[in-house]
Image (spheres, helix red, strand yellow):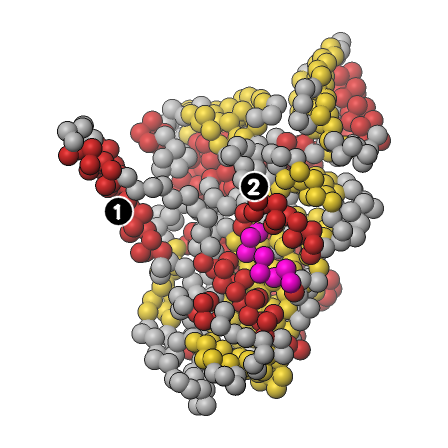
Amino acid sequence: MSTATARHPVALSYAAQSDVVVTPDASRVQLALEGSRGTVGVSGQVKDPTLFRDALAAAFAVLSSDLRYRGRDRTAYLAYLMKQGKRASAQIWEAQKSFLDNALEGEEKKDAVLDPVLTVDPDQVSLEVFSRDESAYARLAFDNSLFDKREAAHGSTFLDVPQDLPARLDRLRAYAPVVLEAHVAPAAKAAPATEPRAPRTVEVPHAWLRGFLQVQSAATLPATTCSIAPIDLYNLLFALRTRRSKKAPRALRFELVPGAPPRLVLEPWEQVLECHGGPYTGSAPAVVRTFGRQRLAALARLLPHAKSVHVQLLGPGLPVFWVIDLGVATLTLGLTGWTESGWSSAAAFDALMPRDVPEGLAEKLRLRLRQDGPLPFDVLTKDAGAPKDQVRAALQLECLRGRVLFDVARGTYRPRELMPTPVDEAALRYGNEREARAHRLLGDGGPGSGEVKLTQVHDLVGEGTRIQGEVVDREAVRSFFPSFTMDLEGRVKDAGCGCPHFRRSGLREGPCEHMLALRLAYARRRAEEEALRQTPEGRKLIRAETRAYVRRDPATGLEQVYRVSLDGKVVALTWGPRLGDSRHQRLWFDSDTEARTAYFSRLEKLTADGYIDAASTLV
């Protein structure tokens, strides 16, 4: 069986159904927990019912969200054309096939995702959800101070969420006392009692588990952090709600300058939102573009309760974490690089896999967390007796196994058993069989290894990057020449390859392994060049690259873009406003060394003049 169709069976058995009981005198929220994990639960009277209701509504909104594009069914229209004598039989067949595929996928999807995970810790109770389109992860944590007369049994298990539970939660009113009861078995005093749910086995696809666990694993990576005020989040959501973009790029751009408040820029309108949450405290300026901004609409329900908002930016194509501080509660929203989890993000997820981990280190850290509870990274490193990079890789591995959770809001690691048995990280290494073959072509081990060469990389100003390469496929005993254009949003167009897979179906069944290998090779070369160019020895090896620098005039608010390219003995310059006409200049030199010296001197002068290196945001 291929990794694309592999599934992880999970048996679920609930003694009751979750329900909300509302009476004139009080309300009772009865949450049914899965019973195979032993005694787990929490109960108490909620001090702030309005916050409790709105926070749960926001978490359940993330759980049910699905922003994937759904084509319209035209079966009835094509049947009408056939009755009129039109030759539409082929179109009717294709429409019916598409309609049935979507319908069956929707039925299968009902039992293709896990129920939310509820974890009771000594200091808080948390709820984790993952959206149906596999692009948004949310963790809602309630502090102990939110409850009166709190009683708890620590542990992790699944939570039953009937389809009508979010609507019933909306019936909670702040003027009446609200009591939370989350137990494996219904409380004896709970009335009326709900009927038990029939036991069922959920066949969770490995692709779903891969996204769920890798988003959490991404939280352990180094990040650029900035803070904005709740009114800034309101302004952002209002701008997104009142306008729609019909063309690319559709990014949310963060402009971060040390000592200055962050700026949010909405593309393609270049609408600038000045933030009021305090100055950016990073050591170096940065410009980071993020995509899938419509998913932030789930945070609107929390605006009346928000105290502050923190954003963690991991880098282009990697997840972004929004932490909403609600006082006695915290919501952490993790968004993947793209709403559509397409193959453009394959290279980004490649960076989320941990490096080699010394044997026994991951298990040692997990046992320490189970014994002493939530701990920060520095404490774990001090007691582990291992280098920081190995400790971080070991914790990242445990996150992929589902046995450790990184609390982004508090910066601590927590023990959390997602499954009764640990998830095999090898089964989550690749999204499908073609991706596994692509890694073998790159020489990552296994039979069928090959060689991948980047032959041409063209920077298309205002459009993206054109990538061409040669892939030596030793298993097929021939070479292929894939190529594609990656636009400003990371999407791929104008793709081509001579392999049988692409000649048969193009991109309708996804990219071939040769395109995936070329995409991964390009991402890895970019990472290597970025590391090399920080050293004098590495700069001597650079013969061709393009960097873009930006600067915003504080008086007019207009942004200037300065692009510098090195190509052998030629240095090309392009500068001007982002939305407007640009000026161009080409400089020829007698040797590569002179051109390289002039190129880096130009970059240093731009930095001294207040320009920000934003090459990754424009390519």
Where disc 1 sits, the SS reads helix
Mark seen at residue 100: 1
In this view, the residue in front, 424 or 500, is 500
Residue 349 visible? The answer is no
Q: Amino acid at mark 2?
A: Arg
Quadrant location of the C terminus in the rendered image? top right
How dense is the environment of label 1, judged by Cα within 10 Å: few (below 14), some, or many (20 and up)?
few
Residue 213: where, in percent of width, then height?
A: 51, 57
Q: Which mark sits nearer the N-terminus, 2 or 1?
A: 1
- Please report the residue visible at 78 percent of the width from the left and 32 percent of the height from the top: 556
Residue 286 visible? The answer is yes
Where disc 2 sits, the SS reads loop
Residue 580: where, in percent of width, then height?
A: 67, 23
Horizontal placement of 165 versus 560: left or right?
left
In this view, the residue in front, 100 or 4, is 100
In this view, the residue in front, 158 or 47, is 47
Residue 422: where, in percent of width, then height?
A: 48, 64
Mark seen at residue 243: 2
Q: From the viewer's perspective, is residue 130 above or below residue 79?
A: below
> Residue 371: within the magenta?
no
- Please report the residue visible at 51 percent of the width from the left and 81 percent of the height from the top: 27
> Residue 299: within the magenta?
yes
Magenta region, residue range = 296-304
The quadrant in which residue 573 appears is top right
Q: From the viewer's perspective, is residue 565 above or below residue 291?
A: above
Horizontal placement of 340 versus 552: left or right?
left
- Please report the residue visible at 72 percent of the width from the left and 66 percent of the height from the top: 379
Mark 2 vs mark 1: in front: 2
Q: Residue furthest right?
A: 608
Labels in figure, total: 2
Horizontal placement of 142 versus 205: left or right?
right
